[in-house]
Image (cartoon, rainbow, N blue to C red):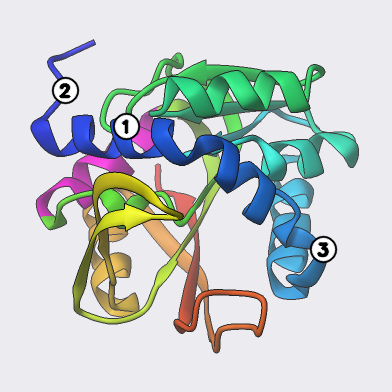
């Protein structure tokens, strides 16, 4: 793997630090997210029995949800500690450590992919390269579901759940993300925005479903 940027090292270290708390607090989040579940069901249908990638899988809860509904899933995360927890919690799912800019996967390996709140840790000029890498690992016609916090600010955390961290959260605009997807060779087929739920951080959320253009 190419040398990791300083920003990615900060992200990796921060998520290694909070991994256990993240699993405890967020590992069951799909139970109160009907919109997310509905969109993930679309991804399952689009995959048509092919392998689904969970890019930025964290402790594996989304990958586990997909696998429980019959999908073959590969979860990929920058944080080795997250990958360790994901393997422990979901032993029937394959997990790999890897960077969104250089995914540990073969060309066209996946029928579909999801990237839920993982691109928010990329720098603005890394979005298009990350989407190009996602396109590389998708088969022709494969779909990618991306979600993110809506806005234009950057929120830096130096403390998270009483742990010292150093991580940036980039709030993104739907049109800007759609433009980066188009640059990377995707056609956006659906877009959705919603308000935050009581169980979530108080941010508005954006979703884009895009298909690999061939």
Q: Earlier in the sequence, mark 2 or mark 1?
A: 2
- In the displayed structure, does residue 146 sit left or right of residue 159? right
- In the displayed structure, does residue 133 sit left or right of residue 67? left
The image shows residue 194 at horizontal and vertical percentages of 56, 86
Residue with the most extreme bottom position: 195
Determine whether 142 is above or below 209 in the image.
Answer: above
Residue for point 38% across, 29% down? 78
The image shows residue 87 at horizontal and vertical percentages of 68, 19
Q: Which residues are magenta?
A: 125-136
**How far, Cα to Cα, is label 2 from label 1?**
10 Å
Secondary structure beneath disc 1? helix
Secondary structure beneath disc 3? helix
The image shows residue 168 at horizontal and vertical percentages of 23, 56
Answer whether labels 2 and 1 touch (C-beta < 8 Å). Answer: yes
Q: Nearer the viewer, residue 68 or 47?
A: 68
Residue with the most extreme right position: 69
Q: Which residue is mark 1?
A: 12
Q: Nearer the viewer, residue 39 or 210?
A: 39
Q: Earlier in the sequence, mark 3 or mark 2?
A: 2
Residue for point 26% across, 31% down? 101
Residue for point 16% across, 14% down? 2
Answer whether labels 1 and 3 touch (C-beta < 8 Å). Answer: no
Q: Earlier in the sequence, mark 1 or mark 3?
A: 1
Q: Nearer the viewer, mark 2 or mark 1?
A: 1
Q: Which residue is mark 3?
A: 31
* Label annotation for residue 4: 2
**How far, Cα to Cα, is label 3 from label 2?**
34 Å
């Amino acid at each position: 793997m190419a040398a990791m940027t300083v920003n990615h090292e900060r992200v990796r270290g921060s998520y290694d630090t909070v991994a256990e708390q993240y699993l405890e607090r967020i590992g069951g989040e799909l139970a109160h997210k009907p919109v997310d579940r509905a969109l993930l069901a679309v991804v399952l249908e689009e995959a048509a029995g092919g392998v689904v990638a969970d890019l930025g899988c964290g402790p594996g809860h989304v990958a586990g949800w997909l696998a429980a509904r019959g999908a073959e899933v590969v979860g990929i995360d920058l944080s080795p500690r997250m990958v360790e927890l994901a393997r422990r919690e979901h032993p029937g799912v394959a997990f790999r450590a890897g960077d969104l800019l250089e995914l540990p996967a073969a060309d066209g390996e996946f029928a579909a992919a999801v990237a839920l709140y993982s691109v928010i840790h990329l720098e603005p000029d890394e979005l298009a390269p990350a989407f190009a890498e996602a396109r590389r690992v998708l088969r022709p016609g494969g779909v990618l579901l991306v979600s993110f916090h809506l806005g234009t600010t950057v929120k830096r955390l130096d403390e998270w759940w009483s742990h010292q961290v150093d991580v940036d959260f980039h709030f993104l605009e739907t049109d800007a993300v759609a433009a980066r997807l188009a640059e990377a060779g995707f056609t956006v087929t659906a877009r959705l925005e919603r308000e935050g739920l009581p169980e979530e951080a108080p941010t508005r959320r954006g979703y884009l479903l895009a298909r690999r253009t061939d």
